[in-house]
Image: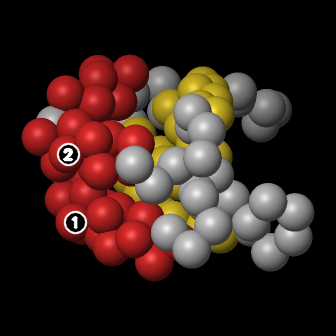
Amino acid sequence: MSVKVIAFVSVKPGHEDGLVAAARPCITASRAEPGVLYYDLWREVDGERRFVFDELYVDDAAVQAHMASDHFKAFGIAARDLASARPIITVTHAVEVAD
């Protein structure tokens, strides 16, 4: 069953470029992981202008493998100093709606 993960990361003012720089190697490596269908970074236009990680995996095992990867752990360490709050992470499973 496909798994979609959406993570919102609020960054301290002036540290936006630092977050993108820290995320870049993680995103590149994540996209190459088996079981990752896509892994993208977005930035909100209005409001807090949070960064949004939009991720799709083939199953829960792929999510767990990603979370155990060295590149994900390295990004987490780097992001701690850049983030203004803990990330908000939503994990969802696909719902089949076709007849």
Say if 48 sits above or below 43 in the image.
above
Is residue 50 visible to us here?
yes
* Residue 34 visible in rendering: no
Please state which of the two labelled residues, at mark 1 or mark 2, is closer to the viewer: 2
Query: How many numbered discs?
Result: 2
Up-down relation of residue 58 to residue 43 (above or below): above
* SS of the residue under disc 2: helix
Q: Nearer the viewer, residue 17 or 34?
A: 17
Q: Quadrant of the C terminus?
A: top right
Q: Earlier in the sequence, mark 1 or mark 2?
A: 1
Q: Nearer the viewer, residue 91 or 47?
A: 47
Q: Residue furthest right?
A: 47
> Do the residues bearing badges 1 and 2 touch, measured as CB atoms within 8 Å?
yes
> Left or right: where does residue 42 sit relative to residue 73?
right
Q: CA distance from mark 1 to mark 2?
A: 9 Å
Residue in the image at 12% along x and 40% along y: 70
Callout 1 secondary element: helix
Q: Residue at x 80, y 75 (%)?
A: 45
Point out residue 81 in the picture as x, y percentages from the top left corner: 40, 49
Residue 95, image quadrant: top right
Q: What's the residue type where badge 2 is placed?
A: Ala
Residue appearing at x 26%, y 57% in the figure: 26
Q: Amino acid at mark 1?
A: Pro
Q: Nearer the viewer, residue 97 or 58?
A: 58
Residue lying at 63% horizontally and 51% vertically, measured from the top left: 10
* Quadrant in the rendering for residue 23: bottom left
Task: State the image coordinates of residue 80 (x, y, percent, origin top left).
Answer: 40, 42
Residue 13, percent from left and from top: 63, 67
For label 1, count other residues whose C-alpha is less than 10 Å away and answer few (under 14), some (14-19) or many (20+). Answer: some
- State the residue position of label 1: 25
Would you name the residue on which mark 2 appears?
A: 74
